[in-house]
Amino acid sequence: MLLGAVLPVLATGQQPSPSVDVPDLFGEVIDVRVVNLEVVVTDRSGARVRGLEPEDFELIVDGRVVPIDYFTEIFGGEALGADDRGEDGAVSRHAVVPGLAPGEPVGTNYLVYVDDNHTLKVVRDEIVRGIIDDLPRLGEHDRMAVVVQSGPRVEMLSSWSRSQRELSEALGKLLDGRLYGGSIRSSLYVARASAIAASRARGGEAVAPPGLGGAAQRVDLELAIAGVVSTLRGFAQPPGRKVMMVIAGDWPIGAFRTDDDSLDHVTELDLMAQMVETANLLGYTLYPVGSSFDHVVWRYAGMRRVARDTGGRPLFDQPAVLADAIEDTRSYYWLGFTPDFSGDDSRHEVRVRLRDPALVARSRTGYLDLSRTAELSMSTQSALLFGHETPGAPLRIELGRATRWGLRKMDVPITVYVPLDEVTFLEQGDEEIGRLEIRLAVVDSSGSQADIPIIPLVLQGEREGGEYYRYETSLHMRRRPHELVVSVHDPLGNKTLHGRAELSFRSTRD
């Protein structure tokens, strides 16, 4: 009979300690990771420069010059080898970035993100039709995924696919006014429309200038940015180069009061920093796509900053945004270095400098030393948003009878059955010992997500084939529909299992 931690009834967010004292038999997993930078090099006129070697670059991390461990020139979507010559006849000699072979095609993953809440359909449709028309330009190894944020929820219209038919059908859904769009629905648009109407009534110009944004506008922007960040985390793992095209529209701009309502303010640039950090963390290059009638300089200042700090460029007033993004991501230099990872989620600044002052380099400006804990929480959030499947036997989730908790909340008992055949154990004497990490991710019908708790468990005893470990807890939440994803991670076997359930006050009652 397998013993484990005492089965406690816990509110979300509590982290029980193991009930048994077990020596650290598992050690540490050696994880040699490489930070890769995609660097576009141009001359002063903007023309691409080919044939450079590692000694032409200087890599500066946190103010200190570090060696370039790997170097590959990508030209036309293909990794150049030692015998490939540039237009000037120079021979490229380098240690190839891990995972690439000379002459091997390099695929690019294009993640198309559409904010349905802030884009006018008449403007967005032209952009979407242009993307559909340019799908044949995708390379043989390129892939695309399509995601839309409509209301508070993020919806995946297509996962990674190379099928032009599938992608065309997914993008085509955005052209259906019954499903998406027709008018901007954000609180920002309502506030601006009211200001414009008042200005007209006074005989002034029909323009709502940027100013101090209220609490509603800040929340509106934070939800929009949260949609982008959640999508990046949900699509964190594809191999090859990663690009996100952000069709955002009229996001709130200006200065917003801080949470403590002090005289200090934050701007849209401050709030957009989270997008930059997440993109740089996951190796995504961001290409903001113009989708607004309002093409004044201050409207796109934040998006220009986002593009610059992730190594991309803005695609404003472009007739063919996908064609331009493909052209911009076909040829670049891929630099790799191996830092001393600590797994402490700390941020590090990265700068690429060229020996020739007449040349200009464009690349992302930093990376995060991501912890394994943060990676697993991203995986759980990905499963919550997009329903990713996992191999092996699934988790079984049983819901108990919900009871009222206060005026507007409920308490829902949860039982999770973990298939022990999917868990790796180590023998210690006559017993077997295993470790698990349980994560609970919950999103309600308005799109609000709670923090993801991490619950460590130690299993100890004897087991037989086909057995399940039962974990019991309870969740306190508002009495409204919720989606629940439970993730169980086995650190030794490096395996994560997911289970999903729908929660509501009625559905969980006897």
Image (tube, grey):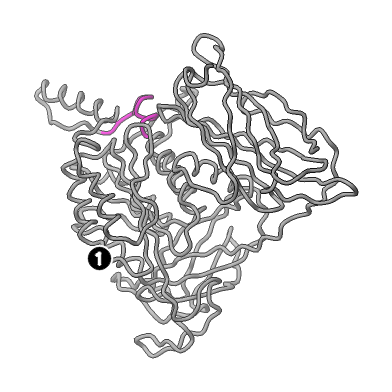
Label 1 amino acid?
Pro
Q: Position of residue 303 (x, y in %)?
A: 34, 48
Q: Position of residue 38 (x, y in %)?
A: 45, 66
Toward the left, the furthest residue is 203
Toward the right, the furthest residue is 429
Q: Nearer the viewer, residue 75 or 353?
A: 75
Against 288, residue 504 (above or below) is above
Q: Nearer the viewer, residue 449 or 479?
A: 479
Against 363, residue 154 (above or below) is above
**Residue range of the region highlighted in magenta in the rendering:** 210-221
Q: Residue at x 61, y 37 (%)?
A: 439
Q: Position of residue 281 (x, y in %)?
A: 52, 52
Q: Please say whether residue 215 is one of the residues in the magenta stretch.
A: yes
Mark 1 = which residue?
Answer: 136
Q: Nearer the viewer, residue 486 or 218?
A: 486
Q: Quadrant of residue 227?
A: top left
Q: Please say whether residue 455 is one of the residues in the magenta stretch.
A: no
Is 39 on the left or on the right of 347, as rendered? left
Q: How many marks?
A: 1
Callout 1: few (<14), some (14-19), or many (20+) C-alpha neighbours within 10 Å?
A: few
Against 393, residue 447 (above or below) is above
Q: Residue at x 72, y 25 (%)?
A: 8
Q: Secondary structure at mark 1?
A: helix
Is 92 on the left or on the right of 453, as rendered? left
Q: Residue at x 65, y 63 (%)?
A: 32
Q: Quadrant of residue 385?
A: top left
